[in-house]
Amino acid sequence: MAWTKIVDEDNRRFNNELLTYNSALQLFKELESESYFYEHEPAEVLFVYNDPSHENFPMERGVPDLSFLGGVRARMIYSEQGSNIDSCQDYKPINPNITNYPVIGELVVCVSYGEEEDYDSNFYLSILNFNGLPSNNQKFGASIGQIKDTLLSSTRHTPNKKDGEKNQGYYYVDISPPKLLPDEGDTIIEGRFGNSIRLGSNQKNDNTEFSSTVHISTGRNRNFENIDDKTESTIRLSENSPSDGFNPAFTPEVGNFSDKSESEILINSNRIIINSKEDGNIGILSSGNITIGAIGDTIIETPEEGNIKLGSNGATEPVVRGDKLVEYLGAFVGAVNRFSNVKSPGELGALATALKAEIATLPNLNNLKSEKVKTI
């Protein structure tokens, strides 16, 4: 909102002399020196419209006006100093696509592109960066002046009941994460909660083999991304594989990942889940090799009616069940050993009878086949 600062310099003449052309020009110069015009005015955020079901949310024809989603009730710190919250105006985010939502107590820059009574013409531009912190730039009381009880309202329910109470919302808590340190030329999007997106490069660490990078991080507790931090989850996209900052769970014997000149996507977290829903599919495809490794168990699990196929989707040949095969071969080898130890023809009859009884106890050969895992 534009505002004008009046400077009381008392340099005007107050006699009743005849106004000539030259004296009129002089008067205009004197008037200009007594005021300064500001196109934009900062305002203190008193309430944020995040919930369309809230009783304070602006309405249009009996339904919530969703153009005010993320909007604010704000008070100008100069032209509305000390005004009651009920007499202050509402302001919508000026950008419909990307919005940095403020919290109560922060200052935003406000503008109006219509008449004073035009309800839909008020917008806020951005949060003013007083503290240099991504999580909070509060300036409580900047618009109160010497007036008391400006937040007491007959029509509104707000988190701030009295002036001086520094409650920034119904549930918002400032966790004070450190601000991400930029490198030269970076573009950074940083949230209030230790999450960030850095569009950067490896120029700071390696000027010989350039790589553009995109680094997405959450759970960050320091002013730079640390891929191996136990609390941080990271996705890093790079034009050339970086040589620093990542220690895998173990070093695989397969050397598929030694070429640093290739582009790379790195996903690193304590737990990684890839899930498809509603009968969706997951494809892991490679024009080279696929390496799967784990310090613990590697489990491929499928429900009772599902199959695991090795080689192709048309695989039909069951693989052998290892324990059953060992059991069968053990009995067979034992029988052969006993046969080889026969010392006289008279022992063959008794041995044949014993072998026949033992063979009857062996599992059916079909039981050696896996019911779920098939190959080609």
Image (spheres, grey):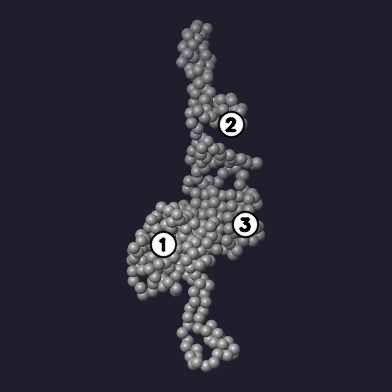
Q: State how far apart marks 3 and 1 are (Cα).
A: 41 Å
Q: What residue type is disc 2 on?
A: Leu
Viewer-proximal residue, 357 or 204?
Answer: 204
Q: State which mark lies toward you, 2 or 1.
A: 1
Q: What residue type is disc 3 on?
A: Ser
Mark 2, secondary structure of its residue = loop
Q: State how far apart marks 3 and 2 are (Cα).
A: 38 Å
Q: Which residue is mark 3?
A: 212
* Residue 194 appears in view: no
Q: Earlier in the sequence, mark 2 or mark 1?
A: 1
Q: Are marks 3 and 1 in contact (CB under 8 Å)?
A: no
Q: Earlier in the sequence, mark 3 or mark 1?
A: 1
Percent from the top left, x then y, of residue 167? 37, 62
Q: Residue at 52% of width from left, 25% of height from top?
A: 371
In what quadrant of the picture does the C terminus appear? top right
Mark 3, secondary structure of its residue = strand
Q: Residue at 51% of width from left, 54% of height from top?
A: 217
Q: Are marks 3 and 2 in contact (CB under 8 Å)?
A: no
Q: Which mark is residue 47?
A: 1
Residue 71 lies, with reference to residue 130, above or below; the image says above
Q: Are marks 2 and 1 in contact (CB under 8 Å)?
A: no
Q: How many marks?
A: 3
Q: What residue type is disc 1 on?
A: Phe
Q: Which residue is mark 2?
A: 310
Q: Residue at 44% of width from left, 53% of height from top?
A: 63
Percent from the top left, x then y, of residue 216? 54, 54
Left or right relative to 41: residue 240: right
Q: Earlier in the sequence, mark 3 or mark 2?
A: 3
